[in-house]
Image: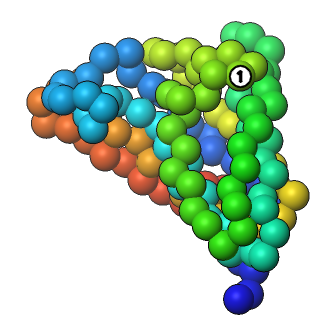
């Protein structure tokens, strides 16, 4: 199979609300990076978060096996520290092999949930 994607992706808009409406975990407000690795090698990924009023945090290290996909909830990132809730952030995603990244947010603060999705910027 052909390898698709780029090695550097940027999501300039991130925000995880601290509360939600509806059953957990399906309706937990969250940010997700949907990562596709079509290459024949595992993707070793590093994510760095950037904030308005503090130094960057990272790298968060993630593996996506060869010819696999991973839907990574930023809410689940713990090391080097949990992603703060109710805080604006952006991120840079770097991989050793080309990958494709799509950004999705579920905001369930109201009973009428909102789902946002967009392709990330690539370099």
Q: Nearer the viewer, residue 102 or 71?
A: 71
Could you tell whether 62 is left or right of 35 in the image? right
- Residue 108 shows in the view: no
Q: Is residue 41 above or below residue 51?
A: below
Could you tell whether 28 is left or right of 104 in the image? left
Location of the C terminus by quadrant is bottom right
Considering every residue shown, the one lying at the far bottom of the view is 1
**SS at circle 1:** loop
Q: Nearer the viewer, residue 72 or 48?
A: 72
- Residue 118 shows in the view: yes
Q: Is residue 70 above or below residue 107?
A: below
Q: Is residue 45 above or below residue 19?
A: below
The part of the image, by quadrant, that contains residue 108 is top left
Residue in the image at 73% along x and 87% along y: 2
x then y, percent, for residue 5: 72, 71
x then y, percent, for residue 26: 27, 38
Considering every residue shown, the one lying at the far left of the view is 111
Q: Residues within 10 Å of mark 1 (few under 14, many from 20)?
A: few
x then y, percent, for residue 67: 66, 73
Residue in the image at 50% along x and 43% along y: 32
Residue in the image at 71% along x and 89% along y: 1
Q: Is residue 16 above or below residue 84?
A: below
The residue carrying mark 1 is: 79
x then y, percent, for residue 77: 61, 28
The part of the image, by quadrant, that contains residue 22 is top left
């Amino acid at each position: 199979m052909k390898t698709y994607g780029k090695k550097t992706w940027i999501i300039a808009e991130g925000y995880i609300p601290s509360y939600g409406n509806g059953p957990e975990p399906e309706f937990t407000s969250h940010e997700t990076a949907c990562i596709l690795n079509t290459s024949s090698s595992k993707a070793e990924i590093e994510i760095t978060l950037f904030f308005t009023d503090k130094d960057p945090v990272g790298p968060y290290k993630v593996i996506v096996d060869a010819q696999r996909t991973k839907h990574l909830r930023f809410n689940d990132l713990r090391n080097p520290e949990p992603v703060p809730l109710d805080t604006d952030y952006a991120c840079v995603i770097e991989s050793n092999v080309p990958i494709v990244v799509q950004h999705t947010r579920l905001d369930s603060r109201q009973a009428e949930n909102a789902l946002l999705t967009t392709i990330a910027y690539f370099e």
